[in-house]
Image (spheres, helix red, strand yellow):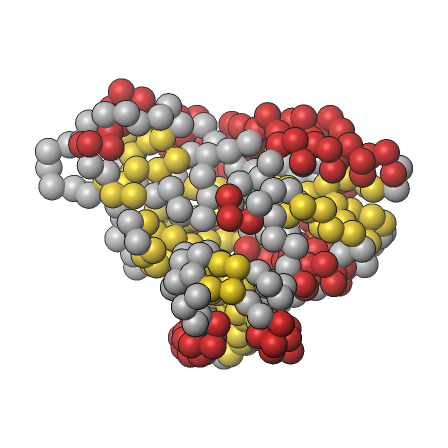
Amino acid sequence: MSGAIDVKGVIAVAALSARLMAEAAVRDGFDVVALDLFGDADTRAAASQWIGLGEPASLEIDDALTLAALRDLAHRGDVRGWIAGSGFEGRPRLLAEGAQLLPLVGTAVSAVCRVRDPALFFDVLASHGIHHPPVRLGALARTLPDDGTRWLVKDALGCGGWQVRPATPEQLAELPAHHYLQQQAPGVPMSATFVANGRQAVILGFNEQTVRRFGTRPFVFCGVVGPVPLDAPAASRVQAAVRALTSAFELRGLCSLDFVRDGDEIAVLEVNPRPPASLALYGDGVMAAHVQACLHGVLPAPPAKRERVDGTEIVFARHDGQVDAALARRLAARADTHDHPRAGTRFAAGDPLCSLAASGTTADAVRAALHQAREALLDTLETPS
């Protein structure tokens, strides 16, 4: 994935965890400043500077720390802009204030707000004939139909599936305004990774998502495998949805479309107007493509078909513990682990510990390799404290 436009320079990447964007940007020739919660060893190794954005245990980006960091970077004079990743979904005001301090390289804040407005988003889908699971918005979201269907409560400002829960009458009595109901759809959870320039888009590939239950949260995003083949009818429907949403919301840069595949049919769930976790599956050039599309409107060529399938998975702790120096060194020495916790890092049950990567010739083979590696890692990592 290459282009004729020079994209070298200093760029800032900000997210709950910025490691993936930081490493990808460094591979593409950028000098990177990483801003996140965790400050993992490999994030710091990739970036020329790391800045903390809050307490890791909070899983929430701190407004004041973020704005102070962006203000300092703007004063440097050599930082071209900043790229916002996961963790900013429900923070339009923070995005807007940050963009005033340092140029935001991505979808415009106004467009992000529109994408995150359920009424507007599903109206756009309906106007383009794009199938999606039935939704209940506004006053309708406070009641459940008495027809035996299963419904989910979703937060339009959330990410990672942490906020998705089965709908119950008790929940609906005090449902916040940005929540809505969506009928649970059968099928395989998938995504399409694409690069957009506000008018057109190029799909890099289709992916299968790994979603698991954690305690009371039944739909937590744990990883992704791809690219995977998609039958022509389903692929055509996804491509049409990506084109329509790119134009309607002026999406820019790396984005992803979440959908459920049931045979040849697809049901669109949401679009993520920022670099997704699946960028890890598409090799060198993805962050350069993001910057070129955002700043110059240049899109990459459609990717050639490839035989290799890649996958990533987040490893979550089963119970409390602590990473000692020996374990930190062993993790860092493994080629299949990323997001390495530093020595002394304490973790609680359910916290993300690190991530895994695997490759193979089929999605099933990659999932099996990730499963085996995850179980082995958990046996090593999680001695109760």
Taking the spot 55% from the left edge, 49% from the top edge, the residue there is: 56
Location of residue 358 with respect to 160 vertically, above or below: below
Q: In which quarter of the image is residue 150?
A: top left
Q: Is residue 199 left or right of residue 131?
A: right
Query: Residue extending furthest right?
Result: 77
Vertical side of 142 occupied by 318: above or below:
below
One can see residue 264 in this view? no
Q: Give percent across and percent down for residue 278.
A: 54, 58
Number of marks: 0
* Residue in view at x 61 percent, y 76 percent: 326
Q: Nearer the viewer, residue 35 or 223?
A: 35
Q: In which quarter of the image is residue 142?
A: top left
Question: Where does residue 140 sit, x and y in percent of width and height?
Answer: 24, 24
Q: Which residue is drawn at 78% across and 47% down?
A: 11
Task: Measuring from the top left, give residue 145's x and y in whole percent.
Answer: 15, 32
| Residue placed most toward the observer, 313 or 305 | 313
Left or right of 41 in this view: 267:
left
- Which residue is the extreme one toward the top? 139
Task: Establish if 135 lies above or below 361.
Answer: above
Placement of the C terminus among the 4 image quadrants = bottom left
Q: Which of 35 and 151 is in front in this view?
A: 35
Image quadrant occupied by the N terminus: bottom right
Name the residue nearer the viewer: 74 or 237.
Answer: 74
Q: Which residue is drawn at 27% across and 20% down?
A: 139
Q: Position of residue 377 (x, y in %)?
A: 47, 75
Q: In this rendering, does residue 215 appear at all? A: yes
Furthest toward the front, the residue is 385
